[in-house]
């Protein structure tokens, strides 16, 4: 019975000019977005791999120089793109592409791609995520608004019910029909997406990406299911199909245009971000005056001097078997690490709390949940940016330590580091955040998603069984 | 006749509570957008004030310590990098000045791109790359979403309000059966359409314009000041004609004689095309026609150039003095080991080496912007967005103008310090008062008005076109289904 | 007053809705067009109102061609469809005021407008109620009130009494007769032979776009009219077979 209803819905929809037109446009947009996303991914990926190699080359090819100068020269860490970023660009355009790892300073990422674009980019980007998150739900609304209300107006609903069809079966059948019509669109897109993924990534990253792609597909399927359920519920509950359409469009506008911005404002209001100027000032104050405000840089150096002299049982710095400059440099770096960890940690925690609030907002607008999940699984959310930034910073600390140790070991003031020292620093390797941690950051998205999925299904069934015929 | 139509349309609208709900909601959204705009401008102003006071404190301290050293009350003991008499130290660190672009008079109305671009720089004698990326701290997720400002309400939601009020302008009369009664009277359908649009347009457009004026007044803009008045006038014109476009579109779709439901679906589809699809497609086209090369290349170029230049530091220095014999120190010998001298020579060489790379970025980005300028006419939403942020001074053009000003100031700053560094001349307390000061020169309002006038044309012409295609169709409107 | 000259209408789907209709209705006449669904009655009225354009021939009101004087000709006519649709959120009085203002009569006092309500037999209290609450008969009466207020010289009615109860229908006929007596030319399309005999001065029987016969009602009894109608239908059907 349900299958028969689903088949009738499907046939009717596929024959409808509105669906054909809408589906064709969405399919064309989706495929071109996937294609462009894939090209963008492979271009950027190739550039970053090449640049990462080049920055290593430059590091190794440095002429012999003071090790601390080498630390000042430093290296760059280029943010790698994960293969699935061709589906969802996430925040990639709004964080820089590279960070300079140099002595004394934990730098911010530089060169945000959005700054090298025109204002049109901020309208909406043609990415697969835009099509999947915004346009497909609109198509579902167009398919679903008249399912019950339209049949009621035509009088066919009365006939159906008089034949003894259970309203619950009717609702399930109609939902399956819409889903089948969507599958006409989504199945080819998924196959192409899979193909692009296989092309874009080597076997190793393919193994990493496949489960993520699977989860991504599952999330979008859930998103569409809940949208279908909402459309059916409204269509069953609405007095007229016109009213159903208006209500559903209103929901779409609220959740895709208004809710994300309101959520952003709320996060800003609840967790205000300090200005870059204040941030830099608190960092430099903490370094100069000490984090407790009582141990200034000079006092810390004097204390270090005393303790090192005591450790080696020496009276003067000249008598030490090591170069005190290296020890002092490393100690001041380490103090810097504490300061940076405190401030960047607080800032990034704040951003993450803001993002959690975005996720919690999904209880009002499911888009917020799917957007967060989609970015997370595509590896382009802030949490994974932070993960990379933290890895780059750890590498910086390894590099600085290596150079400072070379200073410490050589009492000669004119000592120059050799290429052997440069080579002793391992190349920067980055392992992406593992899937369980990615998902752990999405707890609230998942919870809200589940609530919507269950809630909308129950609402659809309830509205369908209680509707007037 | 028109008066009667207006009067009774008004009674009809009033009796339908929906209009008050939607216009009330619209006014609330505008108010919310304005609050957001105010908050952002307040944040920027507070930051600039902090920067200014930091600069004043730093300068007072610098002057005091220079005076103390000059009068022999104090002896400087630290390393050369911290010596306030060193021109390099003052020009790069202790005496740097902020170059700031304060928010414009109408800035609270449109956040535009201002959350993405820096609005102040700490200018030093180093190359521009060192201070040009002074981004404000912001959660990238928030940047991705964008702001809920007045301009957002106008560009995205205002069309929806207009479409909600006019998608069934005539089709509703037909669905209800009153159209035949109406047209049995000696009145042209065009006149009825005109009356209906004038009334709805009057309410919605007046609301949008009044809110614009109110927003400007609340943001403390001096409306008597010519430039601000012109900007605000143009702002209202953009809001009016952008609204007129959506009314004309609704009228044109109504003229096709389809049912209200078909009109609604069609108009929402067109809204999506103009507000989402065309901008996205234009963005793709623009970035592929005039791609900005990856900044990764720039990073590499700078590093290559600076390693090459550092390697030959001393030769560079010698060559520099050959080129500029007037900068040879008069009394002292050139200290070739001086870090200040060598790094300045290296920096100048690197600047020269990367200038063509930098120019390429600017050229490509300008190319993109020119393409957008040309093809924005494909969507009135882009035209409106660009014009509104241009008028608010939060668009790319004012930022580019600011960068030009900063570039001039930076060159002046280097022009002040570089000769001192090469002459190995000390900075005195008196010098501090002679340091260049950055004063932001607002972009000439004529240039803004010129660009916006082009945009206005891009709004007026579609209106004329839509009216031109819709009018004859109303003559043959299918009165009965 | 109302004149059709060789009036022909082909619709886009190639059906011939009206085939060379020629007809003349003088002031004071009440002409009833009879015929089955699809005979071309509504098309005729739409042509007089200029809602559709004729394929050939012309519809004239007071010797003015409707097609070339769309607004001028509407000054003289009033239209009452099967359902007089009014603005449901406005009161009866407001509807009357609006339509007469559109018709160019915008100087009526409230008392004068209430007078029209009285004239068509609508209670005063109804005038200030929203039309959404009106019965069909009341709305049809407002239609007549609009016609009177407009000082229409010709009336075009399209099945105005279908669905009315006998009493309302009777009242409606009486109103029509009064208008006819005051010199208004009336063209009424109807299915209702009884009503045609009762109210009309002439009847015309149409089928498949053709006007088959016309007759004066005073020359026929109700039974004769019915026979004439059925014979015409049979003849029309024969004609259809031949064609």
Image (cartoon, coloured by chain):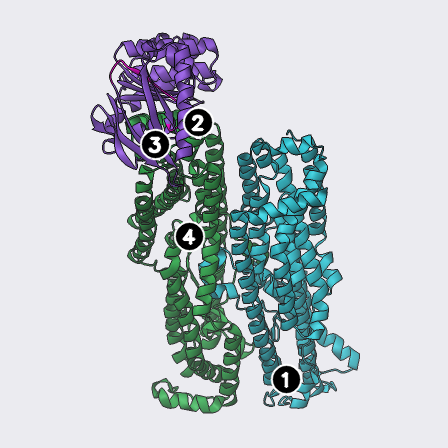
Please name whichever residue, B371 or A80, is drawn nearer the observer in this view of the structure.
B371
Label pair 3/1, CB-CB below 8 angstroms: no
Q: Residue at label 2?
A: C37
Q: Position of residue B308 (x, y in %)?
A: 50, 87
Q: Which residue is mark 3?
A: C18
| Mark 2 or mark 3, earlier in chain | 3
Query: Tags 4 and 3 in contact by the CB under 8 Å rule?
Result: no
Chain C color in figure: purple
Q: Chain of mark 4?
A: B
Chain ID of residue with mark 1: A
Q: CA distance from mark 2 to mark 3?
A: 13 Å
Does the magenta stretch mainly form a helix, a strand or a loop? loop
**Left or right side of A2 for B282:** left
**Residue C35 is one of the magenta-drawn residues:** yes
Instruction: List the residue tagged with mark 4.
Output: B385
Query: From which residue to which does the magenta span run?
Result: C26-40
Q: Residue at x 58, y 50 (%)?
A: A14
Residue A147: x and y in percent read 61, 39
Q: Secondary structure at mark 4?
A: helix
Q: Which chain is green?
A: B
Across and down, in percent, residue A1 comes to 72, 42
- Mark in front: 3 vs 1: 3
Q: Which mark is residue A67?
A: 1
Is B86 situated above or below B223? below
Mark 1 or 4: in front is 4
How far across and how far down the image is residue A218, in percent? 70, 55
The subunit letter for the residue under badge 2 reads C
Q: Is residue B145 left or right of residue B290?
A: right
Q: Is residue B438 visible?
A: no
Distance Cα–Cα, label 4 vs label 2? 56 Å
Q: CA separation, marks 3 and 1?
A: 102 Å
């Amino acid at each position: 019975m349900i299958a028969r209803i689903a088949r009738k819905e499907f046939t009717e929809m596929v024959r409808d000019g509105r669906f054909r037109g809408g589906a064709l446009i969405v399919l064309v947009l989706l495929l071109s977005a996937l294609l462009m996303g894939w090209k963008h991914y492979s271009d950027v990926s190739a550039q970053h791999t090449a640049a990462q190699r080049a920055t290593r080359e430059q590091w190794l090819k440095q002429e012999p120089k003071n090790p601390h100068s080498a630390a000042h020269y430093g290296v760059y860490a280029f943010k790698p793109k994960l293969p699935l970023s061709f589906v969802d660009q996430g925040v990639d355009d709004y964080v820089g592409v590279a960070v300079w790892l140099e002595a004394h300073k934990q730098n911010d990422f530089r060169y945000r791609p959005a700054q090298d674009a025109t204002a049109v980019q901020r309208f909406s980007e043609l990415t697969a995520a835009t099509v999947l998150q915004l346009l497909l739900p609109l198509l579902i609304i167009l398919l679903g608004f008249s399912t019950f209300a339209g049949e009621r107006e035509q009088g066919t609903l009365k006939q159906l019910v008089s034949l003894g069809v259970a309203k619950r079966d009717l609702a399930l059948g109609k939902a399956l029909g819409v889903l089948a019509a969507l599958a006409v669109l989504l199945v080819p897109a998924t196959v192409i997406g899979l193909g692009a993924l296989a092309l874009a990534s080597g076997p190793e990253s393919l193994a990493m990406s496949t489960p993520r792609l699977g989860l991504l597909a599952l999330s979008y399927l859930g998103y569409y299911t809940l949208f279908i359920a909402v459309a059916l519920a409204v269509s069953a509950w609405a007095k007229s199909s016109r009213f159903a359409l208006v209500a559903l469009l209103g929901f779409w506008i609220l959740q895709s245009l208004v809710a994300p911005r309101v959520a952003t404002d709320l996060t800003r209001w609840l967790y205000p971000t300090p200005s870059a100027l204040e941030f830099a000032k608190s960092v430099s104050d903490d370094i100069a005056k000490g984090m407790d405000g009582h141990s200034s840089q000079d006092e810390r150096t004097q204390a270090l001097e005393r303790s090192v002299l005591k450790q080696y049982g020496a009276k003067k710095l000249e008598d030490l078997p090591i170069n005190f400059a290296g020890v002092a440099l490393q100690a001041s770096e380490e103090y810097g690490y504490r300061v940076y960890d405190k401030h960047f940690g607080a800032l990034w925690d704040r951003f993450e709390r803001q993002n959690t609030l975005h996720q919690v907002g999904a209880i009002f607008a499911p888009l917020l949940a799917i957007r967060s999940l989609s970015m997370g699984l595509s590896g382009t959310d802030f949490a994974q940016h932070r993960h990379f930034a933290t890895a780059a910073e750890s590498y910086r600390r390894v590099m600085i330590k290596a150079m400072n140790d070379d200073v410490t070991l050589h009492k000669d003031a004119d000592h120059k580091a050799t290429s052997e020292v440069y080579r002793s620093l391992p190349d920067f390797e980055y392992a992406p955040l593992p899937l369980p941690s990615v998902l752990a950051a999405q707890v609230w998205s998942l919870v809200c998603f589940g609530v919507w999925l269950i809630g909308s299904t129950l609402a659809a069934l309830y509205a369908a069984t209680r509707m007037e015929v | 006749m028109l008066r009667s139509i207006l009067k009774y349309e008004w009674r009809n609208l009033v009796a339908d509570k929906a209009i008050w709900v939607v216009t009330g909601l619209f006014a609330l959204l505008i108010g919310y957008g304005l609050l957001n705009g105010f908050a952002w401008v307040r944040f920027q102003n507070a930051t600039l004030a902090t920067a200014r006071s930091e600069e004043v404190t730093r300068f007072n301290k610098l002057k005091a310590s220079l005076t103390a050293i000059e009068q022999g009350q104090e002896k400087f003991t630290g390393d050369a990098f911290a010596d306030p008499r060193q021109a390099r130290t003052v020009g790069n660190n202790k005496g740097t000045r902020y170059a700031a672009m304060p928010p414009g008079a109408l800035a609270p109305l449109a956040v535009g791109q201002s959350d993405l671009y820096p609005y102040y720089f700490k200018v030093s004698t180093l190359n521009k790359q060192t201070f040009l990326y002074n981004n404000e701290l912001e959660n990238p997720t928030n940047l991705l979403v964008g702001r809920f400002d007045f301009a957002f309400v106008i560009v995205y939601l205002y069309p929806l309000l207009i479409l909600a009020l006019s998608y069934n302008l005539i089709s509703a009369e037909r669905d209800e059966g009153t159209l035949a009664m109406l047209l049995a009277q000696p009145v042209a359908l065009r006149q009825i359409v005109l009356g209906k649009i004038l009334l709805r347009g009057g309410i919605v457009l007046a609301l949008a314009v009044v809110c614009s004026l109110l927003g400007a007044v609340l943001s403390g803009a001096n409306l008597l000041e010519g430039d601000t008045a012109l900007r605000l006038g143009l702002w209202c014109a953009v809001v009016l004609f952008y609204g007129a476009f959506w009314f004309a579109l609704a009228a044109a779709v109504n003229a096709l004689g389809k049912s209200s439901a078909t009109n609604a679906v069609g108009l929402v589809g067109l809204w999506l095309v103009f507000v989402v699809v065309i901008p996205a497609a234009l963005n793709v086209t623009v970035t592929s026609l005039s791609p900005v090369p990856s900044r990764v290349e720039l990073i590499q170029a700078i590093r290559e150039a600076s390693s090459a230049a550092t390697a030959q530091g001393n030769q560079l220095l010698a060559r520099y003095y050959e080129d500029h014999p007037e900068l040879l120190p008069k009394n002292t010998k050139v200290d070739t080991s001086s870090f200040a001298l060598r790094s300045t020579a290296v920096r100048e060489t690197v600047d020269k080496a990367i200038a063509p790379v930098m120019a390429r970025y600017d050229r490509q980005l300008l190319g993109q912007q020119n393409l957008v300028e040309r093809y924005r006419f494909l969507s009135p939403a882009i035209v409106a967005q660009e014009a509104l942020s241009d008028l608010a001074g939060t668009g790319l053009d004012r930022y580019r103008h600011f960068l030009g000003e900063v570039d001039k100031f930076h060159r002046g700053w280097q022009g002040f310090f570089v000769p001192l560094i090469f002459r190995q001349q000390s900075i005195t307390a008196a010098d501090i008062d002679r340091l260049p000061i950055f004063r932001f020169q607002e972009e000439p309002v004529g240039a803004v008005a010129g660009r916006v006038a082009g945009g206005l044309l891009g709004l007026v012409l579609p209106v004329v076109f839509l009216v031109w295609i819709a009018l004859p169709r109303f003559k043959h409107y299918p009165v009965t289904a | 007053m109302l004149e059709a000259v060789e009036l022909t209408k082909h619709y886009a789907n190639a059906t011939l809705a009206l085939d060379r209709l020629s007809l003349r209705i003088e002031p004071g006449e009440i002409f009833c067009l009879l015929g089955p669904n699809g005979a071309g009655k509504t098309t005729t009225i739409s042509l007089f109102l200029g809602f559709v354009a004729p394929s050939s021939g012309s519809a004239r009101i007071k010797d003015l061609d409707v097609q070339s004087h769309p607004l001028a000709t509407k000054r003289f006519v009033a239209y009452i469809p099967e359902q007089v649709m009014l603005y449901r959120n406005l009161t009866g009085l407001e509807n009357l005021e609006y339509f007469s203002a559109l018709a160019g009569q915008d100087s009526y006092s409230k008392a004068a407008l209430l007078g029209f309500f009285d004239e068509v037999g609508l209670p005063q209290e109804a005038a200030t109620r929203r039309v959404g609450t009106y019965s069909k008969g009341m709305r049809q009466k407002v239609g007549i009130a609009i016609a009177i207020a407009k000082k229409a010289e010709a009336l075009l009615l399209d099945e105005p009494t279908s669905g009315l109860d006998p009493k309302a229908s009777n009242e409606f006929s009486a109103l029509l007769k009064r208008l006819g007596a005051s010199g208004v030319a009336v063209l009424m399309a109807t299915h209702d032979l009884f009503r045609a005999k009762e109210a009309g001065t002439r009847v015309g029987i149409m089928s498949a776009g053709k006007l088959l016969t016309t007759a004066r009602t005073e020359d026929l009894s109700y039974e004769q009219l019915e026979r004439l109608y059925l014979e015409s239908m049979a003849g029309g059907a024969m004609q259809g077979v031949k064609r």
